[in-house]
Image: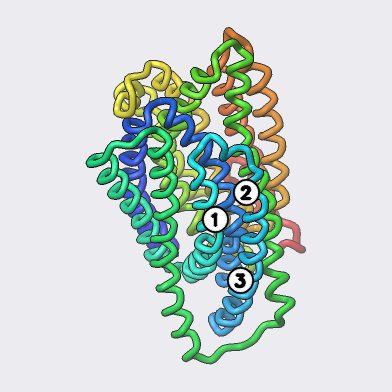
Amino acid sequence: MAIYYRGIFFLAASAFLGEGIEFLVNMILARDLGRHGLGLYMSILPSIFLLVLLSSFELHVSISKFIAEKEERYHRNILYHAITITIIFTSILLVLATIILPFIPVFNAYHPYVRWLVLILIPVISFTSVARGYFMGKNQMGKIAVSNFLRKIFQVIVLFLLFRYFEFNTEASLLIAIATLIGSEVVVFLYLFLNFMIQFQLLKRYPFSNLNRKAVRKNLMAVSVPTTSMRLFTAFIGAFQPFLIKAALVRSGLTQTLATEQFGMLMGVALSIGFFPAFIAHSLMTVLIPAVSKSHSEKDYTSLQKMLNQVMKLTLLYGVPAVFIFYLFADKLTSLFFHSPSAAAYLQMLWPFFLFHFFIMPLQAFLIGLGLIKDMFIHSIWATVISFTMIYLVGSLPEWRMDGVIIAMNTSSILLALMHYLTVCKKIGVTIFMKGVIRKTSER
């Protein structure tokens, strides 16, 4: 447990600094891109994140889980097979992306170079995922923490220097913003993969045992495939959501330009502020996946119950004060980006979305560690169907518009958190009030 808490501390401390820098990045983007430019930037991000997800194949999750469950003498063999899978998968994805990218219309509104810049992400993210998964499984969270910090500091320095000393039009500014984002991932890759290769060479000096190649790949795929499917669904939803929201707003009577600006206020300002404390939730998720996997493989339900109890209390401890501060100081916080009463109102209305999102992240780590990825996927489908239906039906009403969109987002977050929580409680043998229940003998 000491390693568990130390890992959370390292990740949370670096993530806090990283989120602070991310806040500065969004402020720079807001001021230099303008409202419409920020809306365009936020609209393309889900599509880029979709490619990132495909490239990672969620190998960091499957590798960290497998490394945590197996003895050290098997690690070298696991990594060898993971690298082989990565090389094959990356090669296939690069070929497919090169063929398909020219026909994807979402890139038409951006500089032509954007289409090809994103190809760099495929090998970079793929091999970074292998290194990240190994360090997560070994509970070497310090390296993950440093890599997260390097990503943010690179972004803020490059953006500040370029926008401070040079003038660009909107199209060029968007290109620079996206190129800087991709460059930050290259920096992370260089740091993590260099450290990974050093660790891999050290593993060669110690005794090792081979696992059956098919067994290793089966175990990696057993986590990567369903997790990637679930993340793909979420990413597709994320890529489609900007167009759905803007379509609903246009249907309610707004112009396309005004709808894009309001979407920029929602995603680039309100969500940027509200997700600031989520660095704690992300840190918990990163540490919990291998910790829960190990305890579950050992049938240690007492530790699992204790971890869940601690995670719920910690999330309440920081989540409630955070959303309270956002609600009280919404106007002052949003004015750091733009002087916009609309953005302040969006931030205030979104407090349930943020609070329950803080719970969703660690609960997803429990579901992955407990092997309940299918349940997590089903929960996401239900929450998304309800959310999108409400966005279109309520958001397109002239009297509701963005208020209706936010109500739909709040509903989705609450529903998803409750479904995750009830499923985890049932699996580890506690009631919703954290009281232990008698487990079946077969589960012991």
Image position of 12 (left or right of 239): left
- Residue 79: x, y in percent? 57, 76
- Residue at image mark 2: 101
Which quadrant of the rendered structure holds the N terminus? bottom left
Q: Amino acid at mark 2?
A: Leu
Q: Amino acid at mark 1?
A: Leu
- Residue at image mark 3: 87
Q: Amino acid at mark 3?
A: Ile
**Mark number, residue 4:** none
Q: Is residue 321 visible?
A: no
Q: Nearer the viewer, mark 1 or mark 3?
A: 1
Number of marks in the rendered image: 3
Other residues around mark 3 within 10 Å, as few (<14) / some (14–19) / many (≥20): few
Q: Earlier in the sequence, mark 1 or mark 3?
A: 3
Image position of 141 (left or right of 108): left
| Distance between the alpha carbons at the discs numbered 3 and 2 | 21 Å
Residues at marks 3 and 2 touching, judged by CB atoms closer than 8 Å: no
Image position of 256 (left or right of 345): right
